[in-house]
């Protein structure tokens, strides 16, 4: 007795479901196991149905469709639709008849069409670039604070001149730039939602490809981006055109196997017979796609024979005299049957409507059947979501660089809601004050782990431990039987489909994906190899470049300029030149050198911590004061941040030194702990005296005799005393690169003459406050700050 799908359908009770559409919320009756995406795909199909049905009713749309087929067995057709076993689908479409490239006119026509398609793909990006440029022109005028005439004049508004130049380079005409400067609004370009056009067919003689390198390169250029299918046999070219116009259906092998178990071969034959009679006329070609082929192959002991068994079932169902088409290329049909590309991770919808990722059920079942550990596979795929025992960077390693339980708890909480390690080690997960005061880094540090001393390998291992590898290709406990499916799931599915199509003698027009860096010469070599190997149909397509790919282009000022030899020598003249500084922030290296200076100003301890660029230039400072009020300490911390940002944006250190030395406020007075600064009129005076002496060679700011062999070389020192290099070089920064027997020779220091001070004859200096003002040669000179004040009444 033939299998009755209507009997299975009668056992399923459809349930009402609230579904949000683009313009409204509808209540839809659907099988309980269908996801929202699957139901929406069926509703989109129903909206295109020519039959009069109730809007939003799947049952009515399916019933009306089955009746339009004018087949006696329409009840089983309807039941197979309602069970999610079959759906109408589109065959792989192609454009027109084959272009015979033995004809030069055909080559020209094909080349013109490919160029037109590429222009259409480039057009949205070009339009967007013009729109952005014109929007910047309008913004440059709106942000100007002068008169309207001056703001709209590129010769008087530099920002407008720059924006207009960018807009012109993007392709905007000058009249469009003028209108944008006048305030005319330009609407944003709409998103390009046009589907990619169907490929073209090129009939090529394989001998021409292998013998004529120029012709091969010309064909490779046309087909590099998937726009052209090369056919080496005219019979298959015409068959491909015929199959493109034939009806098609898509079967869900997973749903069939779930419904009938081991009888799926007979069920496939029955479905093909029913639908062949329903959608085709006698002798008309039919394309039948098999969805879930890789999932089914995992459950079959002899997967190699599966394609042959399926081909036999399909042939018997539709009739051996009927021509079979190629592949089904219909993403909407895949959605209607709940099918997804074969991979280790499957996106699914829970009963609560939440979309989550999981290990693909067919792979999980196969792992369990082979004696593997499903839990281990899931941990390798999705990670452990903890760093407690992670390799490379665990809790112990983080505590070693300053993390406390509070920060570790925040990290563990954030691990449940992010997917990258970099998103955790920054604000707002970690407190900005902790990052700045404890770790000594900026809150916006882009790579905190590297700045803390962790290498790239440790970071990668910790990231994989926490968030998984994304696939099972490197899973150590992989069962041998599943090696091909887990290491290369896409290739595994493609090989099965190829076997099925070959057994049907159907044409496979799927594009072979190529790396985005593949050149036309590489495509030509692959095409020539395919021609020598006897391939019937060849199609290549270079993949899109990564989203973060960007060329490293030099700035306009860095481009070499060609001097014209005939230009007359410039004459001397006085001109006013406006210099616009580079406003790009110069980042410090992740591992930086510097020094820490401890001193006391008027009894108040001050710590200065510097950070340097690789060339020794100062790039940041940190100021820390102990036993001071919280407000004063915070003010000094933020002052140091402001100075650091200024240095990194190119403000010369000289400007800061000249601005802050000799500032006067408490605490002030004697300085202890610094071998070059003896007194200061304020904390800021001390700090910038120290920076001026150490980084600018401003020795006139030093107002105390240096101790012998100090780090700045300011002391008189003993000429015969040698100091180990470790006294000056950080062993941690050098990582042991400096040899132990390296010493600093003493004769390289300048000798500074001692300045005797007679306490009995010294007066207080009106500038710095020190009792170092003495008469020398009839002139009063301050030995501390060096000024020569005029003394009234002397």
Image (tube, rainbow, N blue to C red):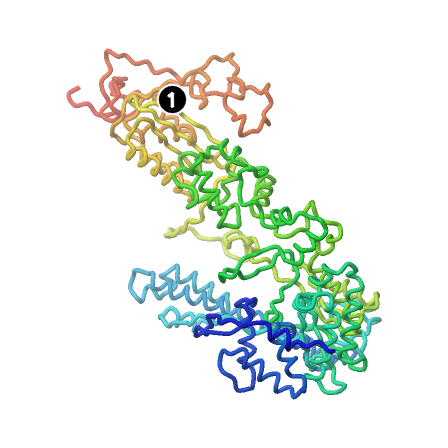
Q: Measured from the top left, where is residue 461 in percent x and y? A: 60, 42
Nearest the viewer among 452 and 481 is: 481
Q: Name which quarter of the figure residue 176 lies in.
A: bottom left
Query: Could one spot residue 224 in this view of the protein?
Result: no
Give above or below for 774 relative to 596.
above
The residue at the far left in this view is 793
Considering only vertical position in the picture, is 421 above or below 31? above
Above or below — where is 284 with respect to 535?
below
Q: Residue furthest bottom?
A: 70
Q: Which x, y percent locates residue 229?
A: 72, 72
> Which of the 4 image quarters holds residue 314?
bottom right
Please give the name of the residue rendered at 51% of the width and 79% of the height, measured from the top-left corner.
Answer: 57
- Return the residue nearer the eye: 302 or 207: 302
Q: Can residue 278 be seen by looking at this rendering?
A: yes
Q: How many marks?
A: 1
In front of the other: 33 or 241: 33
Q: Is residue 126 left or right of residue 622?
A: right
Number of residues whose C-alpha sits closer than 10 Å to that of mark 1, classed few (under 14), some (14–19) or many (20 or more)? many
Which quarter of the rendered picture does the C terminus lie within?
top left
State the residue in front, 734 or 384.
384
| Quadrant in which the N terminus is drawn | bottom right
Q: Position of residue 782 (x, y in %)?
A: 28, 21
Q: Quadrant of residue 673?
A: top left
**Which residue was labeled with disc 1?**
674
Residue 249's spot in the image, x, y percent? 67, 76
Q: Secondary structure at mark 1?
A: loop
């Amino acid at each position: 007795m033939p299998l009755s799908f209507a009997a299975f359908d009668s056992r399923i009770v459809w349930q009402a479901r609230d579904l949000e559409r683009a313009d409204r919320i509808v209540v839809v009756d659907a099988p309980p196991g269908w996801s929202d995406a699957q139901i929406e795909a069926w509703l989109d199909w129903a909206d295109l149905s020519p039959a009069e049905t109730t809007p939003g009713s799947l049952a009515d749309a399916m019933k009306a469709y089955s009746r339009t087929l004018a087949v006696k067995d329409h009840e089983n057709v309807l039941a197979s639709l309602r069970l999610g076993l079959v759906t109408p689908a589109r065959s792989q479409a192609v454009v027109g008849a084959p272009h015979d490239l033995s004809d030069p006119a055909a080559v020209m026509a094909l080349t013109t069409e490919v160029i037109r398609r590429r222009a259409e793909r480039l057009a949205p990006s070009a339009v967007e670039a013009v729109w952005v440029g014109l929007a910047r022109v309008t913004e440059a005028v709106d942000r100007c604070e002068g008169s309207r005439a001056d703001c709209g004049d590129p010769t008087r508004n530099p920002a407008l001149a720059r924006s207009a130049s960018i807009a012109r380079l993007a392709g905007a005409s000058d009249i469009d730039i003028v209108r944008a400067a006048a305030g005319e609004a330009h609407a944003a370009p709409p998103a390009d939602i046009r589907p990619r056009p169907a490929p073209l067919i090129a009939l090529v003689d394989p001998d021409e490809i292998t013998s004529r390198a120029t012709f091969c390169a010309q064909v490779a250029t046309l087909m590099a981006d998937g726009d052209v299918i090369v056919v080496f046999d005219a019979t298959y070219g015409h068959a491909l055109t015929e199959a493109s116009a034939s009806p098609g259906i898509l079967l869900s092998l997973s749903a069939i196997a779930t419904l009938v178990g081991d009888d799926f071969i007979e069920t496939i034959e029955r479905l093909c017979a029913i639908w062949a009679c329903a959608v085709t006329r006698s002798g008309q070609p039919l394309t039948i796609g098999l969805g879930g082929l890789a999932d089914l192959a995992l459950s079959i002991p002899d997967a190699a024979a599966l394609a042959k068994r399926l081909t036999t079932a399909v042939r018997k169902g539709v009739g051996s005299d009927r021509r079979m088409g190629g592949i089904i290329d219909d993403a909407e049909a895949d959605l209607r049957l709940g099918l997804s590309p074969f991979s280790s991770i499957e996106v699914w919808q829970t009963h609560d409507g939440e979309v989550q990722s999981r290990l693909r059920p067919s792979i999980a079942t196969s792992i369990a059947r082979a004696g593997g550990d499903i839990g281990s596979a899931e941990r390798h795929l999705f990670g452990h979501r903890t760093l407690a025992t992670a390799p490379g960077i665990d809790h112990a390693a983080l505590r070693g660089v300053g993390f406390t339980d509070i920060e570790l708890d925040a990290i563990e909480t954030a691990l449940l809601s992010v997917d990258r390690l970099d998103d955790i080690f920054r604000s707002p997960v970690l407190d900005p004050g902790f990052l700045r005061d404890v770790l000594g880094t900026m809150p916006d540090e882009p790579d905190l782990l590297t700045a803390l001393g962790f290498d790239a390998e440790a970071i990668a291992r910790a990231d994989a431990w926490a968030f998984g590898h994304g696939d099972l290709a490197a899973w150590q406990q992989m069962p041998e039987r599943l090696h091909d499916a887990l290491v290369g799931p896409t290739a595994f599915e493609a090989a099965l489909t190829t076997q099925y199509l070959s057994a049907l003698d159907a044409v496979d027009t799927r594009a072979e994906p190529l790396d985005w860096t593949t050149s036309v010469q590489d495509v030509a070599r692959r095409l020539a190899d395919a021609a020598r190997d006897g391939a019937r149909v060849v199609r290549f397509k270079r993949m899109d470049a990564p989203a973060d790919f960007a060329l490293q282009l030099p700035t306009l000022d860095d481009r070499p300029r060609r001097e014209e030899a005939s230009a007359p020598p410039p004459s001397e003249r006085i001109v006013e030149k406006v210099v616009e500084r580079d406003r790009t922030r110069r980042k410090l290296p992740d591992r930086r050198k510097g020094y820490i200076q401890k001193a006391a100003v008027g009894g108040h301890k001050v710590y200065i911590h510097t950070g340097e660029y690789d060339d020794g230039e100062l790039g940041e400072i940190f100021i820390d004061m102990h036993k001071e009020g919280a407000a004063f300490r915070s003010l000094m911390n933020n002052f140091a941040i402001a100075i650091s940002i200024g240095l990194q944006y190119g403000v010369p250190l000289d400007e800061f030194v000249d601005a802050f030395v000799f500032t006067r406020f408490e605490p002030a007075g004697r300085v202890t702990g610094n071998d070059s600064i003896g007194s200061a009129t304020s904390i800021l005076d001390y700090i910038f005296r120290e920076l001026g002496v150490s980084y600018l060679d401003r020795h006139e700011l030093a107002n105390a005799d240096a101790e012998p062999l100090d780090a700045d070389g300011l002391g008189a020192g003993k000429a015969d005393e040698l100091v180990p290099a470790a006294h000056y070089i950080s062993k941690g920064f050098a990582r042991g690169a400096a040899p132990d027997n390296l010493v600093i020779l003493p004769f390289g220091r300048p000798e500074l003459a001692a300045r005797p001070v007679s306490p009995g004859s010294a007066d207080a200096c009106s500038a710095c406050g020190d009792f170092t003002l003495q008469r020398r040669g009839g002139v009063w000179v301050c030995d501390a700050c060096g000024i020569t004040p005029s003394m009234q009444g002397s």
